[in-house]
Image (cartoon, rainbow, N blue to C red):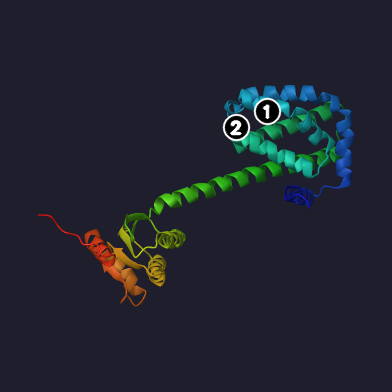
Amino acid sequence: MSDPTNLQAELQAKRYKKIFFLQEEDVFNVHNVGEQIFNQKDAAFAEFYAWTEYQSDFTSYFTDTVLDEIEREEETTWRDLILADLDKDFISRQEQMGYKLYKMGVPFEAYLASIVAFHEIIENIITRKGLGSIEIFRSFRKITGIQMCVITDIYNSISNKTIKEQHTVLMSMSTPVTRLWKGVLFLPIVGIIDSLRAREIMAAALSEIANAQTSAFIIDISGIAVMDTAVANYLIKLTQATRLMGCTSILSGISPVVAQTIVELNINTGQLIATGNMEDALKRAFKMVGVEIHQSI
């Protein structure tokens, strides 16, 4: 059975070759020149390290730890670029290096700038050796273009994953379903509610109701000043869905504006339980679960 990771790398290699119109002739051109400058690795990296010291915008990111990691990968980096062995392993190595530097705190702009600088250093070496031509540089820039594309994709992937994780955390914080009593759950909704957040609130609430075997569910919307018809419709659907699960929802803190929005939906609100404040909502909820409240004098 083939390794899914290797298969993905192979597919990516084919995609990048297609995007940059990389031909066998390009690989041959770069490989041929690369063999003739192979012994220039130390000089190239010495020039690169000097470059990192004079970049006012990026110097702080190229810490000793980062430079040590780059130094450990010198041989591999050099071979990848000047011998143009563009296969699944090339893609995997670029991705791994991208992940490493990202975790070390090197932002995309700094890493991309360093790659571009290193490419230019190699082109200058090719020129000084009298090996440069339009065809050679065109072929070499296809290889370097693919490397930059891989790094861009990696950083975008990491960034999107981070944003998704942060969104999940924020949603869990903004949907704080709390158990008030056995059989009674409480959800305060505060802030701006759009259709996306309304759907996520609905999903989170129904999940909590199922897990807690809830009989009464108080939804306090006093913290919502404005609500469009789409969001109001989601709230009505939420109360209907909880009823199907054997749970009664109580809408608390409905403002005049929100009440008007709900009426404009032309939905039968005969079975909708609504209260103007939390005190009345709590009395109803506790009564549903058989809890008596005695007010002290």
Does residue 206 lie above or below 267 as drawn? Answer: above
User: Does the CB distance between marks 1 and 2 fall below 8 Å?
Assistant: yes
Amino acid type at mark 2: Met
247 sits to left or right of 280: right
> Does any portion of residue 190 appear in the rendered image?
no
Q: Quadrant of residue 63?
A: top right
Mark 2 crowdedness (10 Å alpha carbons): few <14, some 14-19, many ≥20 = some
Depth check: 126 or 224 in front? 224
Depth check: 130 or 98 in front? 98
Coordinates of residue 119 in the picture (x, y in percent): 75, 33
Q: Secondary structure at mark 1?
A: helix
Depth check: 21 or 252 in front? 252
Q: Secondary structure at mark 2?
A: loop
Does residue 216 lie above or below 57 as drawn? Answer: below
Q: Please state the total of marks drawn on the protein image.
A: 2
Q: Residue at x 70, y 34 (%)?
A: 115
Depth check: 107 or 126 in front? 107
Coordinates of residue 196 in the picture (x, y in percent): 47, 60
Q: Quadrant of residue 183?
A: bottom left
Indicate which disc, 1 or 2, sits on the residue closer to the N terminus.
Answer: 1
Coordinates of residue 173 in the picture (x, y in percent): 41, 49
Does residue 224 lie above or below 163 as drawn? Answer: below
Mark 1 crowdedness (10 Å alpha carbons): few <14, some 14-19, many ≥20 = some
> Does any portion of residue 120 appear in the rendered image?
yes
Q: Residue at x 61, y 38 (%)?
A: 108
Does residue 106 lie above or below 2 as drawn? Answer: above
Amino acid type at mark 1: Glu
Which residue position is annotated with label 2? 104
User: What is the spatial separation of the Cα atoms under label 1 and label 2, in whole angstroms?
Assistant: 10 Å
Which residue position is annotated with label 1? 69
